Image: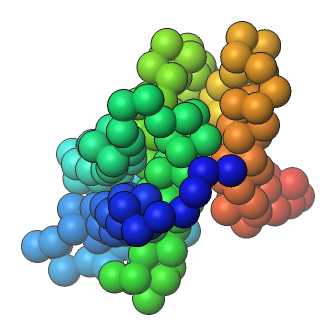
Amino acid sequence: MPEIDPALLFRLVICFLAGSIPFAVLAMRGTGLDIRQIGSGNPGFNNVLRVSKWRAAMTLAGDLGKGLLAVGLCRQPGESALLGWLYGFAAVGGHCYSPWLRFNGGKGIATSAGVMLVLYPAWATAAVGLYTALRVTARHFKWKESGMIASLSSWALFTVLLLVFLGRNEGSLSALMTGFLAWRHKKNFQNLLAPA
């Protein structure tokens, strides 16, 4: 376990605050609409997509970018993989429990994808490829809860790749993130399992 010193705490707070920027809400500025009152009520990419493709693209870029930049800027050369993951969890935590939204927030998928990309770009590319393929397939077959299926499947693949190629320690950290993201999607699971 890394030693918790003021410099590390400062970097974790920076990651949390960067993650807390509510890009879904910002992307809806000027529309007169509150994304938290539309569709699922979730301030994230998938919900903004119900309203506007280009505003959803802005949301995705912001949410992905804040995970990538927060970890990329705060991670110091030579630091352990565990510290990289701590920064990532702080950024995702900021997104999911944003103080700007009364400690409510999105489900963490795009921000966690940014974390994934900066920590393990090669394995993340494979996971993003699966996500893209599943979204295209889901659109064709009109799957229920397609965003959740694609998102959590890509994290499951990412976790398996880390377990196989990098070992139990890093795979376990990825499994922890996957479990947290699945928990954030509990309502989506309920919708998926509900009778048609």
Which residue does the image show at 76% across and 32% down from the upper left?
169
Q: Is residue 159 above or below residue 16?
A: above
Q: In the rendered view, how is the structure colored? A: rainbow
Q: How many marks?
A: 0
The x, y position of residue 185, in whole percent, is 69, 58
Tell me if residue 26 can be seen: yes
- Residue pushed farthest left? 30
Q: Nearer the viewer, residue 4 or 91?
A: 4
Which residue does the image show at 36% across and 31% down from the upper left?
77
Quarter of the image where one finds residue 195? bottom right
- Residue pushed farthest bottom? 102
Which residue does the image show at 44% across and 29% down from the upper left?
78
Q: Is residue 80 above or below residue 148?
A: above
The quadrant of the picture occupied by the C terminus is bottom right
The x, y position of residue 127, in whole percent, is 58, 22
Q: Is residue 86 above or below residue 106?
A: above
Which residue does the image show at 11% across and 73% down from the upper left?
30
The x, y position of residue 105, in whole percent, is 48, 72
Q: Is residue 111 left or right of residue 157?
A: left
Tell me if residue 150 can be seen: no
The x, y position of residue 139, in whole percent, is 54, 30
Quarter of the image where one finds residue 186? bottom right
